[in-house]
Image: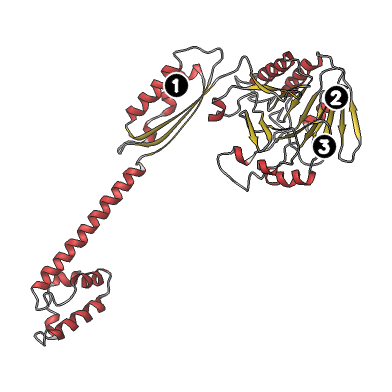
């Protein structure tokens, strides 16, 4: 069988803004795209909605979306198998749509979520901790689905469910969670599932939630990140690959990616500076934007600017006024921009610390020279370790210094009395 796969449509995203139709228009193209590829059914991996309590406008987008699939007839049989082993048959006469709910649709236990409503309305099959069988009379595909749950408990929930593949059919496991290997940092408090935690024996593992598409081989297994059909946050990974959908052929095991024909492009530009002047920063930003907008776009693109590093001494990042710098281009794109400059670079700080350390050494050496000079005016002269005496005096250990001086006096065979010691030059006392 041929299966169309995509995820994270986020109906209702950006309501009340210029981008309010993006979610529907791009999901519509994804669905129309998979239908043109003659798929047998469609698999969605969660976050159809942007909110767990969708607005009427978001519901309208969802019903318009599923209405597209309703126009395509199908004689496939679908049967949902519950955890207690009971079965629920579905027969709509149109192309089957199977989905889990995502983290955006998650609601506390006992409350109905949006995908349960869609299933009750005859739009799709909703899975959570169970599976369904899709059959054309010759071949059967088993879809095992675990909907989005809080990240901290995801592994425990997965292990408690403990799905096992159905014998003699093509088995797919669908999740909607963060996966440790695909995140920039490991945080056991927020992400609990690794690829190694996934139950074995499935022909394809599918995961929504993360908005960039990726196919990974781990061991002998295939893991698919579906990505999203719409950009909700301007991230670097989303700028590197267009939004789209996948088509899987269970016979050949071939998995193909297809781009959504008309979509907003994403440009992510990170600029690093070191002790730069404000003019340097301004010239580089405006140079990049001038180059970017020297060409035209079918839709206003999404542009993310991230400025990092340091600006030169005497300059303040607040003087840059990045928003004013972007203002002339505001009508050409949707911007997200920030700067995280430090006024003094780390290298500059290190250099200043080294200079301070050198000056500190110089002061110490000067003090030692002064001590030696004053001692030369006394009978002690070089009778003891002047550096040790200096260190004691600089640390306030006056008693130790005095004891050493008295021992030196005794060694000088009584040439100076204790009272003479009180007449030691005032510069020595000051030290």
Element assignment for label 2: strand
In this figure, which residue is indicated by the disc labeled 3? Answer: 130
Q: Are marks 2 and 3 in contact (CB under 8 Å)?
A: no
Q: Position of residue 35 (x, y in %)?
A: 74, 15
Query: On the image, which quarter does residue 110 sit in?
Result: top right
Q: Is residue 92 visible?
A: yes
Q: Is residue 418 visible?
A: no
Q: Position of residue 306 (x, y in %)?
A: 46, 31
Of the 4 image quadrants, the one containing the N terminus is top right
Res. 327 mark: 1
Pointer 3 local density, CA inside 10 Å: few below 14, some 14–19, many at least 20: some
Q: Nearer the viewer, residue 87 or 23?
A: 87
Distance (Cα) linking label 1 and label 3: 52 Å
Instruction: Of the two numbered discs 2 and 3 on the same chain, state the one appearing first in sequence.
Output: 3
Distance (Cα) linking label 2 and label 1: 56 Å
377 displayed left or right of 186: left
Element assignment for label 3: strand
Res. 385 mark: none
7 displayed left or right of 324: right
In this figure, which residue is indicated by the disc labeled 2? Answer: 135
Instruction: Of the two numbered discs 2 and 1 on the same chain, state the one appearing first in sequence.
Output: 2
């Amino acid at each position: 069988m041929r299966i169309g796969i995509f995820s994270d449509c986020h109906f209702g995203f950006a309501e009340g803004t210029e981008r309010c139709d993006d979610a529907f228009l791009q999901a519509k193209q994804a669905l129309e795209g998979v239908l043109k590829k003659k798929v047998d059914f469609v698999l969605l991996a969660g976050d159809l909605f942007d909110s767990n309590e969708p607005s009427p406008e978001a519901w309208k987008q969802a019903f318009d979306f599923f209405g597209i699939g309703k126009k395509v007839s199908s004689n496939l049989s679908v049967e949902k198998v519950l955890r207690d082993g009971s079965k629920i048959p579905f027969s709509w006469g149109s192309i089957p749509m199977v989905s889990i709910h995502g983290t955006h649709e998650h609601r506390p236990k006992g409350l109905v979520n949006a995908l349960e409503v869609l299933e009750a309305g005859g739009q799709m099959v909703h899975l959570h901790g169970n599976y369904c069988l899709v059959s054309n009379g010759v071949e059967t595909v088993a879809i095992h689905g675990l909907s989005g749950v809080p990240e901290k408990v995801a592994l425990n929930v997965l292990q408690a469910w403990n799905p096992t593949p159905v014998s003699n059919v093509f088995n797919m496991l669908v999740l909607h969670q963060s996966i440790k290997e695909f995140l920039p940092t490991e945080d056991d408090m927020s992400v609990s599932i690794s690829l190694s935690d996934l139950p074995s024996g499935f022909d394809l593992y599918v995961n929504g939630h993360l908005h960039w598409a990726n196919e990974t081989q781990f061991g002998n297994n295939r893991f698919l990140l579906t990505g999203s059909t719409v950009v909700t946050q301007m991230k670097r990974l989303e700028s590197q690959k267009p939004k789209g959908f996948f088509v899987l052929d269970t016979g050949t095991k071939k998995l193909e990616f297809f781009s959504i024909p008309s979509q907003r492009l994403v440009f992510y530009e990170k600029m690093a500076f070191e002790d730069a002047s404000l003019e340097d920063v301004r010239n580089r930003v405006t140079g990049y934007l001038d180059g970017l907008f020297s060409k035209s776009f079918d839709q206003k693109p999404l542009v993310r600017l991230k400025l990092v590093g340091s600006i030169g001494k005497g300059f303040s990042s607040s003087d840059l006024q990045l928003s004013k710098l972007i203002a002339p281009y505001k009508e050409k794109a949707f911007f997200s921009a920030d700067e995280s400059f430090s006024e003094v670079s780390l290298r500059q700080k290190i250099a200043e610390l080294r200079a301070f350390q050198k000056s500190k050494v110089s002061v110490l050496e000067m003090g030692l020279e002064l001590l030696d000079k004053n001692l030369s005016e006394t009978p002690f002269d070089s009778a003891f370790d002047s550096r040790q005496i200096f260190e004691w005096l600089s640390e306030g250990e006056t008693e130790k210094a005095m004891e050493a001086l008295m021992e030196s006096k005794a060694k000088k065979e009584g040439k100076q009395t204790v009272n003479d010691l009180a007449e030691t030059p005032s510069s020595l006392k000051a030290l």
